Image: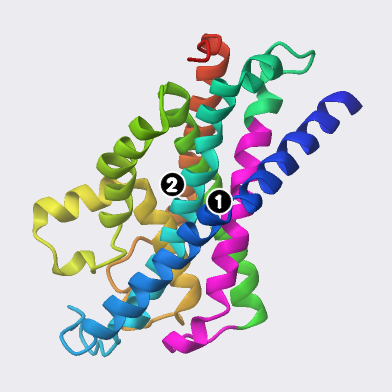
Amino acid sequence: MRRPLAALRALLWREVIRFLRERNRVFGALLQPIMFWALFGSGLRASFHPPVAGGSVAYDEYFFPGVVVMILLFTAIFSTVSVIEDRREGFLQSVLVAPVPRSIFVLGKVLGGTVLAVAQGLVLLVLAPLAGLRLTATVLGESFLILVAVAFALTALSFCIAWRMESTQGFHAVMTVFLMPLWLLSGAPFPSLGAPEWLRAIIRLNPVTYGLAAFRRVLYPAGAPIVEGLPSMGLSILVTLVFCALSFGGALGLTFRAGPRAPA
């Protein structure tokens, strides 16, 4: 029992230390979403009109929860690039033949990315009052739990994609055409109520939609016009937990089904 736990702890902290040492990844995951929020929030403030009765929310306020989720996504992507790098350096092969379950390797990678993503998400979350959102101890606590679930699911999903990739260039290409649309079609940059029906159907099928909806419901008071049309809190939590289970299960399946590819 001690050996797997020690391996898990070592893998987790290896991910954290490795990520923090590469400052370009830290800045890329944190500063780019903040820049988007500042520029788009200011530029679209005057033209944003929520499609809800009595809605008078500034765009920077509406966009803020989506930017926090963007930070989770970017950090998940940047942290799981290490799967490709570890394969190239030979570290992955040595870990997978070590006398510990492969599930420990997957869990260590995913938890490491989750810790990093949530930490950076919380850094931005404390700026919520600048967007007109009120933070309380309850809001912070509930937000933390939701961010952990969303970050875990996104990191596990990114792990699944990185495991299949031969190069970081290929991984970033998949990120552009698959992972980023998950965020764009979650209701983060625009309300789904104002979208065409076909687009709303896609948004409803997107699991990230439900994690973001739960996050919005925590940040806004009950009955606020801006949460009108969002999935219920119960459904949002259920879908997010299923998303976590499926993503992590997929990551486990990939590592157990086939051995790692030889480094190039």
Residue type at mark 2? Val
Judging depth in this view, the residue of 39 and 148 nearest the camera is 39
- Decide whether residue 121 is among the magenta residues: yes
| Rendered position, 116 above or below 259 | below
Magenta span: helix, strand or loop, mainly? helix
Range of residues picked out in magenta: 107-135
Badge 1 is on which residue? 149
Residue 97 position, x and y percent, is: 71, 11
Residue at x-position 26% and y-position 90%: 56
Badge 2 is on which residue? 239
Residue 113 position, x and y percent, is: 59, 45
Helix, strand or loop status at disc 2 = helix
Q: Quadrant of residue 83?
A: top right
| Residue 112 seen from this side | yes
Residue 147 position, x and y percent, is: 55, 59
Q: CA distance from mark 2 to mark 1?
A: 11 Å
Residue 139 position, x and y percent, is: 59, 76
| Residue 241 seen from this side | no
